[in-house]
Image: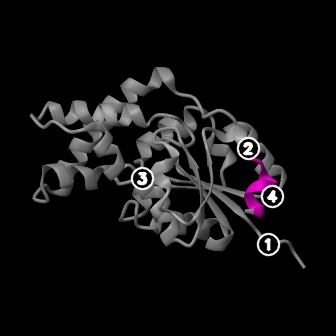
Amino acid sequence: MAATRRAFIFDMDGTIVDNMSFHTESWIAFFQRRGKDIDADEFFRTTAGRQGKEIIRAEMGEHLNDDEVRVLNDEKELVYRELYEPHRKTVTGFDELIALAKAHNVALAVATAAPNANITFTLDGLDLRRHFDTVVGAADVARGKPNPDVFLLAAQRCGVAPEHCIVFEDAPLGVEAARRAGMRAVVLTTTLPADAFAEFDNVIHVASDFSELTINELFSS
């Protein structure tokens, strides 16, 4: 009997790369230009994993049409890329973990709320796209996290059942999306401490980076 196909599904921002502080900083700058002050910690906790268009409408009004939202979101993302580009690198241990996963025939996917321009900026900028069986982003699903759509589509494209997928996340909304998808989750504490995820029963491991993780340990959890 053939072995069950398994998959690792990685959130991108804050997980593959430790960049969420730059996203938050760029959102703060974006809103301050429009006379709106936001609390950085609260903003991250309630928006990380949501699509930019959802955040803009929630903060600036549902009356905005699609073209207006697109222009505003592109402006914010340009600020982000300018801030983060000098610091762009993978989280410690990531490259080694995905190499081991490949050697064990584990499918690899990215499932992110990022738009295509940011996916290109990160994955192609670091020459990572070639390692993944599929990349799912904001352009592929209508709803951001905590809805499970992005993870379910990634699993479908990999040909792996949700229960055989492990999601790597750094944000509560992402872990909730994994839970709704019927997937276990590994939390990276790149942005929030472990206790921010205490309520989730689908979290199997919490780590500061990927160097603390092993293939056998993850699939035996």
How far is disc 1 from disc 3 in space, using C-alphas? 28 Å
Evaluate if marks 3 and 2 touch, with contact meaning CB atoms under 8 Å apart. Answer: no
Where is residue 120? Give x, y as percent.
Answer: 49, 40
Residue that extends furthest to the top in the rendered view of this protein:
86
In this rendering, the count of numbered labels is 4
Region in magenta: 213-220
Q: Quadrant of the C terminus?
A: bottom right
Badge 4 vs badge 1, beta-carbon distance below 8 Å:
no
Indicate the amino acid at tag 3: Ala
Nearer-N-terminus badge (3/4): 4
Tell me which label, 3 or 2, sits earlier in the chain: 2
Kindly identify which numbered label has been placed on residue 105. 4
* Vertical relation: 5 (above or below) 174: below
* Residue pointed to by mark 2: 97
Rendered image: mark on residue 104: none
Q: Position of residue 112 (x, y in %)?
A: 48, 52
* Position of 204 relative to 92 (above/below): below
Query: Going 76% across and 68% down the picture, which residue do you hit?
Result: 5
Is residue 215 found inside the magenta-colored segment of the image? yes
Give the Cα distance between marks 3 and 4.
26 Å
CA distance separating discs 3 and 2? 23 Å
Q: Quadrant of residue 135?
A: bottom right
Q: Which x, y percent locates residue 96?
A: 75, 38
Badge 1 amino acid: Thr
Q: Which of 87 and 72 lies nearest the eye of the viewer? A: 87
